[in-house]
Image (cartoon, rainbow, N blue to C red):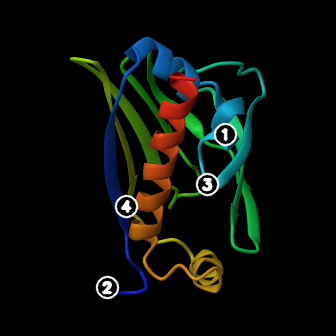
């Protein structure tokens, strides 16, 4: 893989809870720190106070010794079905959560897609944190996120 790898990753997990319950937890951005190993906290900003197209939130992230913030914009929000947001800055990835009712609960599909390479300073920070394969690192993080989502939804 080249240093300029693009990222595309998808994980899924069936969770014994309703799509509406899981959507409610995922779209309460103030709870992201309870789920994600990389995003420490988030809060709605501006006039936004919930998941709707065009709403923005500020997320604070940490990888190794690097800490940064982004201000994603919500690109899809259908209660109990899909929540998607795009990180700005041209190269920013799109994160998507889909909720599919299945027997025994909900199949949650989390995916991320980045169509343009991250700039050198971000790749350098990732490398310093020991991350040489960002897609593998993100996949692992998403698996942790969905395991934590299940823990929260079934507590």
- Which sits earlier in the primary sequence, circle 4 or circle 3? 3
Q: Residue at the spot x=62%, y=26% of the render?
A: 55
Q: Quadrant of residue 56?
A: top right
**Mark number for residue 37?**
3
Of labels 1 and 4, the one closer to you: 1
Q: Quadrant of residue 35?
A: top right
Q: Residue 52: where, in percent of width, then height? A: 55, 19
Of labels 2 and 3, the one closer to you: 3
Looking at the rendering, in which quadrant would you find the C terminus? top right
- Which sits earlier in the primary sequence, circle 1 or circle 4? 1
Q: Residues within 10 Å of mark 1 (few under 14, many from 20)?
A: some
Which residue is at the front of the view, 137 or 43? 137
Q: CA distance from mark 2 to mark 3?
A: 25 Å
Q: CA distance from mark 1 to mark 3?
A: 8 Å
Q: Residue at the spot x=47%, y=22% of the render?
A: 22
| Residue 95 in sight from this viewpoint | yes
Q: Quick check: marks 1 and 3 in contact, CB under 8 Å?
A: no
Q: CA distance from mark 4 to mark 3?
A: 23 Å
Of labels 1 and 2, the one closer to you: 1
Q: Secondary structure at mark 4?
A: loop
Which residue is at the front of the view, 142 or 53? 142
**Mark number for residue 1?**
2
Q: Residue 122: where, in percent of width, then height? A: 62, 74
Q: Quick check: marks 2 and 3 in contact, CB under 8 Å?
A: no
Residue under pointer 4: 115
Q: CA distance from mark 1 to mark 4?
A: 28 Å
- Which sits earlier in the primary sequence, circle 4 or circle 2? 2
Q: CA distance from mark 4 to mark 2?
A: 15 Å
Q: CA distance from mark 1 to mark 2?
A: 32 Å
């Amino acid at each position: 893989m080249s240093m300029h790898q693009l990222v595309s990753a998808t994980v899924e997990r069936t969770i014994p809870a309703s799509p509406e319950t899981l959507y409610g937890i995922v779209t309460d951005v103030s709870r992201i720190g309870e789920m994600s190993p990389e995003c420490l906290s988030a809060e709605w900003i501006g006039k936004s106070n919930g998941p709707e197209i065009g709403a923005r939130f500020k997320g604070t992230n940490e990888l190794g010794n690097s800490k940064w913030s982004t201000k994603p914009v919500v690109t899809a929000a259908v209660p109990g079905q899909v929540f998607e947001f795009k990180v700005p800055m041209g190269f920013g990835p799109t994160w998507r959560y889909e909720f599919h009712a299945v027997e025994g609960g909900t199949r949650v599909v989390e995916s991320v897609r980045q169509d343009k390479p991250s700039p050198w300073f971000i790749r350098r920070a990732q490398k310093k944190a020991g991350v040489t394969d960002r897609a593998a690192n993100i996949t692992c993080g998403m698996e942790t996120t969905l395991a934590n989502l299940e823990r929260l939804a079934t507590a």
